[in-house]
Amino acid sequence: MHRRAALEMLFSAFSFSIMNLVVHALKDHLAWQVIPFMRFLPTMLIAIASARMHGVPLVFRGTKMLWARSFTGSIALLCTFYALTHMSITDTVTILQLSPLWVAVILAVFFREHTPRSTWFYIAMALCGVLIMQRPAFDGESFPFFVAMSGAMVIALAKVFLSRCHNIAPIAVVAHYTSCATLVSFFLAMTARSNWVVHADFQPWMWLAVIPLGIGGTLGQLFMTRAYAHGNTNMVSLMGLSLIAYGVIYDYAFWGVVPDTLKVVGITIIIIAVALSIRSNTKAQAIKEPVEEGEA
């Protein structure tokens, strides 16, 4: 992998980690429904301005695949933000890293693509890691966990749809996606109505959190796209696993959260399974344009 692509992906992961940190920090101050709108609006404005600046025509009607990408991408980010405001950063980003495995499942089940047996082994291995890490009780308290798992699956769907939008300029795809996500998140924010602030200690200056939130997400998307353009797709994806390390650092530094032994074992199993899957010869290698992971 080119050194440039590696540096770009690491900076992308760091930018997304800042976004994740801000989202998690706001969980005790703002209703979770409001935070996605604060995240999407700045990126939409930047994407539209960038498209206009470079003379790229904006796409309004688009294709079915573009709408599917925008819709699934929007839902994926909403799942991500819900999980980040109800779970630790480490747990959330680790579960979201399962998306490459779900890509393989989707391509095999719905598109009849050949999937090596080793990939199915890695999927089973990763799911075992999830059970060890999370130990879900399958009750109401496990709901955020299932939202995060659903988010990983929807991210995978968005990747598959995005791979079929190759005839549309990337910046136009981003502008369409963020416009759709902004509208969806706006209506979601309206469901909270006057209950946007959920903590009496919230101060007006805290609204400035929208700045690192928007900048982190936008730079993360930008440098991830550049990294995928400059380097090997699979190796760049491996660099994205660094988000888990950032999550562990932030959880400990700001909230004093230390993972127990079983959680460390589970996370390690997941990382190994995902890394081996990414390096294997699967159809997921054809995905050249990344979607946002909390990152989206």
Image (cartoon, rainbow, N blue to C red):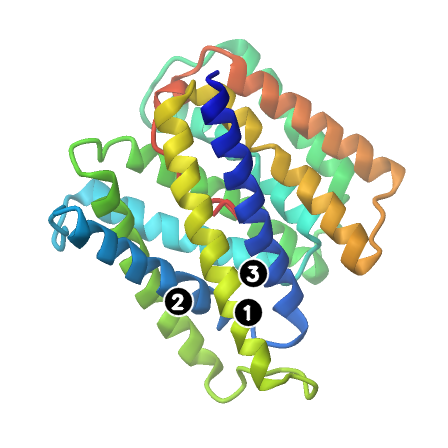
Please name the residue that numbered disc 2 is placed on: 185
Mark 3 is on which residue type? Tyr
Query: At 41% across and 72% down in the image, what residue appears?
Result: 188
Q: Nearer the viewer, mark 2 or mark 1?
A: 1
Q: Nearer the viewer, mark 1 or mark 3?
A: 1
Q: Name the secondary structure under disc 1.
A: helix
State the residue in front, 237 or 204.
204
x and y percent of residue 55 in the render?
12, 47
Q: Name the secondary structure under disc 2.
A: helix
From the viewer's perspective, tell me whether residue 88 is left or right of residue 20.
right
Q: Which mark is residue 256?
A: none
Mark 1 is on which residue type? Ala
The residues tagged by marks 2 and 1 sit, at their Cα atoms, a distance apart of 17 Å
Please name the residue that numbered disc 1 is placed on: 209
| Residue 195 versus residue 42 in the image, above or below | below
Q: In which image quadrant can residue 155 be found?
A: top left
x and y percent of residue 110 in the render?
34, 28
Closer to the chain start, of discs 2 and 3, is 3
| Residue 36 versus residue 118 in the image, above or below | below
Query: At 25% across and 39% down in the image, what residue appears?
Result: 170
Q: In which image quadrant can residue 143 be found?
A: bottom right
**Mark 3 burial class by Cα count in 10 Å: few <14, some 14-19, many 20+:** many
Closer to the chain start, of discs 2 and 1, is 2
The residues tagged by marks 1 and 3 sit, at their Cα atoms, a distance apart of 17 Å
State the residue in front, 259 or 58.
58
**Which residue in the rendered view is the most extreme toward the right?**
261
Please name the residue that numbered disc 3 is placed on: 82
Q: Do the CB atoms of the residues marked 1 and 3 lie less than 8 Å apart?
A: no
